[in-house]
Amino acid sequence: MLNVYFAAGARMWPRYQAPLAQALAAAGVEAVVTEAAPADPAAVDYLIVANGGVVSDFAPFTGAKAVLNLWAGVEKLVGNDTLTQPLCRMVDPAMTESMVEYVTGHVLRHHLGLDRHILNADAVWMPETAPGPARARSVTVLGLGELGSACARMLAALNFRVTGWSRTPKSLPGIRCLSGDAGLAQALAEAQILVLLMPYTAETENLLNAERIASMPASAVVINPGRGPLIDDAALLAALDSGHLSNATLDVFRVEPLPADHAFWAHPKVTVTPHIAAETYPETAAVVVAENIRRAEVGEPLMYLVDRSRGY
Ligand code: NAP
C-alpha cells in the first residue's frame, strides 16, 4: 500500500479526496491518500503539491519517488534546493479547455470592441466601430506550450492571423511559428492583440518591457494569463497612459491577491481577473496524478517532468 501525502492545502482537499481515490483505483494503484502531515515523512511515497504550499522542506521525504504538482506553473518549486525528487507539473485537459475559453473570450471581446457597446451609457450610435473580420486581425501568442498552442489553434480556427513564439522552433498548421530574438521582434511588431502564456523563469521575467511594448502596433491590447512578472508593470501602465496600448486584461500579478491600492484596479484601461483563467479541475487532474503514480511504480517514464535547468 502506497502512502500519498496531499500537501496541496486543506482548502483543496475536499475537492480532490474523492476524485483521487477513484482515479487511483481505476489505475489499479493501491494507495492511501492523506491530507494530515505524516508522522514519518520518510514513509511517504508521493507528494501532491500546489506550486508550493504546505511543504517547503522536502528533505525529510527521503522515500518519495516523485512530487506531483497540481499547477501548470512550477516557479515556486523549481528553485527549492530541498526538492531533489522528480518534479512533475500539471497538464490537465480541462485546464487547457478553460484557458482556451478565457483567451478566446477576451480576444473576441477586444476584437469586437464589446466594451464600447456594453458601456455605452450615453447611448451613442457608433456605426464606424464595425470590427472587420478576424482574418484582418493579428494575434500573437508568446509561449506555444500546452496552453499557448491550444489557444493559438482555436484562434486560427476562428480565422485570426495567428503568430506564435516559443524558445525552440515549432511547426503548427495555420500558425506562423517563430522563435529566437529576431522571431520575438517580428511577433511583437504585428501583435494587435498579444497573449502571454509563458512560464515565469529567470529568462522570461520582464520579457514585455518598455522597449518591446513600444515595438507593438499602436492601440494594441495585452492579455496576460501567464504570470505577472512576464510584464514590466510600470512600462505597461506608461504605455496605457500614453495611449500606445489600448487595454490590458490581466489575470496574474507579481503579488496575489492584487493589493487593493494597486494602480491596475482603478485604471480605466485595465481589466483585472483574479487568477481564474484556468483552474485545475479535480476530476481530470486526479487521473493525471494517478497515471503518473502508476507509471512510476512500474518503471515507466513520468509524464510532464519539469526540466530544472530550464525552470519549467
Ligand atoms: P508549457 O507547456 O511548459 O509551455 C511553455 C511555453 O513557453 C513553451 O512553448 C516554451 O517554449 C515557452 N517558453 C518558455 N521559456 C521561454 C523563453 N525564455 N523564451 C521563449 N519561449 C519560452 O507551459 P503551459 O502548460 O503552456 O503553461 C504556460 C504557463 O501558463 C504556466 O507556466 C503558468 O505560468 C501559466 N498558467 C496560468 C494559469 C492561469 O489560470 N492564469 C493556469 C495555468 C497555467 P518551448 O516550447 O520551446 O519549450
Image (cartoon, rainbow, N blue to C red):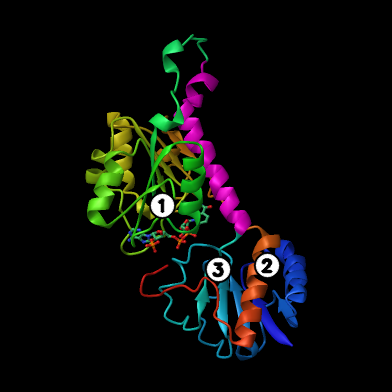
Badge 2: residue crowd in 10 Å (few <14, some 14–19, many ≥20): many
- Which amino acid does the dot numbered 1 rest on? Gly
Q: Secondary structure at mark 3?
A: loop
**Quadrant of the snapshot with the N terminus:** bottom right
User: Is 253 placed left or right of 6 in the picture?
Assistant: left
Left or right? Give the position of 70 relative to 224. right
Is residue 96 rendered magenta in the image? yes
Q: Is residue 298 left or right of residue 233?
A: right
Viewport quadrant of the C terminus: bottom left
Give the label on residue 176, or none: none
- Which residue is depicted at the point 48% across and 26% down? 112
The nearer-to-camera label among 2 and 1 is: 2
Residue type at mark 3: give it.
Answer: Gly
Asked if disc 2 and disc 1 are in contact, CB closer than 8 Å, the reply is: no
- Mark 1 or mark 3, which is nearer to you? 1
Residue bearing the label numbered 3: 53
Residue occupied by mark 1: 228
First in sequence: mark 3 or mark 2?
3
Q: Residues within 10 Å of mark 1 (few under 14, many from 20)?
A: many
Would you say the beta carbon of the disc 2 residue lies within 8 angstroms of ligand 1? no
Q: Which residues are magenta?
A: 93-120
